[in-house]
Image (tube, rainbow, N blue to C red):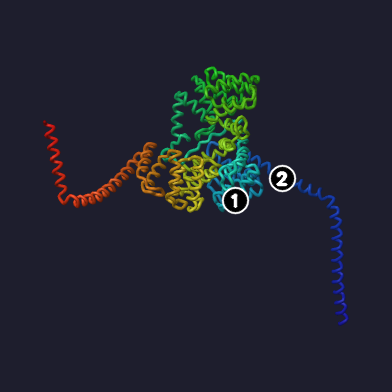
Amino acid sequence: MNEIKQFLSHTLEQRKLNKVINKRETLLGKKKNQRKLRIKGIQNKDLLKRNKSHSKKPAKKNFTDEGDQLFKMAIKILQQSRNQKQKEEAYILFAKAADMGNLKAMEKMADALLFGNVGTQNITAAIQLYESLAKEGSYKAQNALGFLSSYGIGMEYNQAKALIYYTFGSAGGSMMSQMILGYRYLSGINVLQNCEVALNHYKKVADYIADKLEKSEGIPVEKVRLTERPENLSSNSEILDWDIYQYYKFLAERGDVQLQVSLGQLHLIGRKGLDQDYYKALYYFLKAAKAGSANAMAFIGKMYLEGNAAAPQSNATAFKYFSMAANKGNAIGLHGLGLLYFYGKGVPVNYAEALKYFQKAAEKGWPNAQFQLGFMYYSGSGVWKDYKLAFKYFYLASQSGQPLAIYYLAEMYATGTGVLRSCRTAVELYKGVCELGHWAEKFLTAYFAYKDGDIDSSLVQYALLAEMGYEVAQSNSAFILESKKAKILEKEKMYPMALLLWNRAAIQGNAFARVKIGDYHYYGYGTKKDYQTAATHYSIAADKYHNAQAMFNLAYMYEHGLGIAKDIHLARRLYDMAAQTSPDARIPVFFALMRLETVHLLQDILFFNFTMRRKWKKLDNTLGPYWDLFVIGLIVAMLIFLLRNRYR
C-alpha cells in the first residue's frame, strides 16, 4: 500500500511538472508568434488601418452627408418661413441634424435654447451645448460663452474670462466677437482704450458687411425704444401695427397710389415688422405703375435688375421700366439707367452715359446716385481720380444714411485719403456700417418677445446687442433690468447691471440715460446715495441735451440745497426753463413753483414780523409810547392840506 501511495504521488508530481513545462513552452511559442506577427504587422500596419477605416468610412460619410442635407433643408425652411409652425418644422430638422453630429445644427439648437426662439428658454442646456461646441473649436460658441460670462447669466460673472472667449471667437472668425472687441477698445471697457485696435476690429466687420451690401440693400433695422410711454409703444412708428396695415391695405386696394408704392417698398425689403414678400411688392408696384406712378415703375425696374422669385432677372425688362420712370424725371429711374450703363447690363459699358444719369439723379437728391458718383471719382472709373469730389459725394449720400457711402468715408478717414486722417471718425463711421449686420434682426425678435411677455428671452437678445455696442439695446436692457421682471439674473445684481448699461448708453449720447444715472445716484439704486454726482449728471443732461426732466430735477436740488449750494433764484429759473422746453413739464413746474413761492412767502412773512417788532421797540424808546398816534395825525393833516389845494 505504501508503494502504491508513493507511485501515485510521484505520478501526480510528474504530471504537474509536465503541465508547468507545457505552459512555459506554449507561452514561449506564443511570444515567438507574436514577434513574427509584429514584424509582419509593422509592414502591413497601414494596410490594416486603411482596411478598417475604409470599411467604416462609407457609413460615417453617409451619416454626415445626411446631417448636412437636413441642415440645408432646415435653413431653407427658416428663410421662407411665414409662421411659427414652419419655424418649428425647421428646428425639428436642426435637432435631427445635430443628433447626426452636424456642428452648425448644434449651434442653431444652442441659440434656440439660449434665446427661446422655439419652445421654452433653457440657458443651462444651452451652456452645456456651447461648452461642448467650444471644445470642437466653434467660434460662435466661444462668442456666446463670452457674452454669458460678461453678464453672469447662467455662469459666473467674469469679465476677464469673457475677454478670453471673445478673443478666441474673433480669432476663429466670429464677426460678433470682432464687433464686441471693437466696442470694448473704443470705450475702454475692461481693456485700455485704444482707437487703433478698435479700428482694426471694426474694419474687419465693416469689410464683411460692405461686401454683403454691394450685393443687396442690406437688412432694415427697426430699433424700438422700450423707454417710450406704453401708449406710444403699441403704435410705434418703427413697427407697423396690424390694424393700421389692414387699413393701409384697404386704401391701397381702393386706388391710393402713394400707399400702393409704400406697401410695395415695405414688402420689397421687409420693413416695419412686415415679411419680405416679392409677390406682394410686385403686385402693388404694378397697380401703382398702371396709375402712372414713376416711383413704382423705377422699383419694378429694380426688381427685374436684381432678380427674385416674383421678377426673374431681366436686363431688358429693367431697362424698359427704368426708361419709363426716367422719362418722367424720376431720380430712381435715372439712377437705374446709370447702373445699367456702368456695369454693362443689357447695354454696352458706357461710363459717360452712366456719369450723365448719375449726375441727374444726384441733383434730385437720390443718395444712391450720389454714392455712385463718389465711387466713380474714388476708383477712377471713366473719370480722373478726384478724392475731393469723391469725399463730397460720399458725404452727401451719408447724410441720408447710404451705408456704402458711410463705409467709403470711413475708408478715407482710416487711410487719410483725400482728407486728414482721423482714427476716431473712422471708427465711428465703421461702427455705423457694422450695426447693419444680420444680427440686427434681433431687435425685432426681442421687441416681439417683450410684447408677448417673454421678458427673459427679450432681455438676452437685447443684452447681446448691447454688448455689441448698440445704444438702443443698452437702454432697453437697462429698462428691463430695472423693472425686475426678469428671472435669469439675481435681483440684487439687476440695479448695478442696469446702472452700467445706462452709463454706456449715456456715453453714446442718450439724454434719457444720463438723467437715469442721476436718478440712480440720487436714490441710491445699485450704488451709494450721492447728491453731488446726481447733480453733475443732471447738469450734463440739462446743458448739453436741454432735457426738461434734468432741468426740473436740478431746480429741485437747488431749491433744497441737495449736493449743491441752495439758490432759490436759480431754482426758479430752471423750473421756468423746464416748462419752456417741454409742454409736458408745465403742470409739474406750476405746482413746484406754487410750492416754492408759498414757502418763500411764509418765510418772508415770518422774517417781516420778526424785523418789524424790533423796529417798533426802537421807535418806542426814541419817540415815546404814543409815537404811532403822532404819525397818524401828521398823515391826516397832510391829506387835508392836499385836498384844499386841489379844490382851489
* Residue 623 % position (x, y): 18, 49
Identify residue type, mark 2: Ala
Q: Secondary structure at mark 2?
A: helix
The disc label shown at residue 59, or none: 2
Crowding around mark 1 (Cα neighbors within 10 Å: few <14, some 14 to 19, many 20+) is some
> In the rendered image, is residue 508 in sight?
yes
Crowding around mark 2 (Cα neighbors within 10 Å: few <14, some 14 to 19, many 20+) is few
**Residue 64 position (above or below residue 42):** above
The disc label shown at residue 160, or none: 1
- Please give the count of numbered marks on the rendered protein: 2
The residue sitting at 68% across, 43% down in the picture is 64
The residue sitting at 68% across, 44% down in the picture is 63
Classify residue 592 by image quadrant. top left
* Residue 523 % position (x, y): 42, 50
* Residue 234 % position (x, y): 44, 38
> In the rendered image, is residue 277 in sight?
no
Classify residue 74 by image quadrant. top right
Q: Tell me if 454 is positioned left or right of 585 in this view.
A: right
Label 1 and label 2: CA atoms lie apart by 43 Å
Viewer-proximal residue among 642 and 396: 642
Viewer-proximal residue among 537 and 46: 537
Mark earlier in primary sequence (1, 2): 2
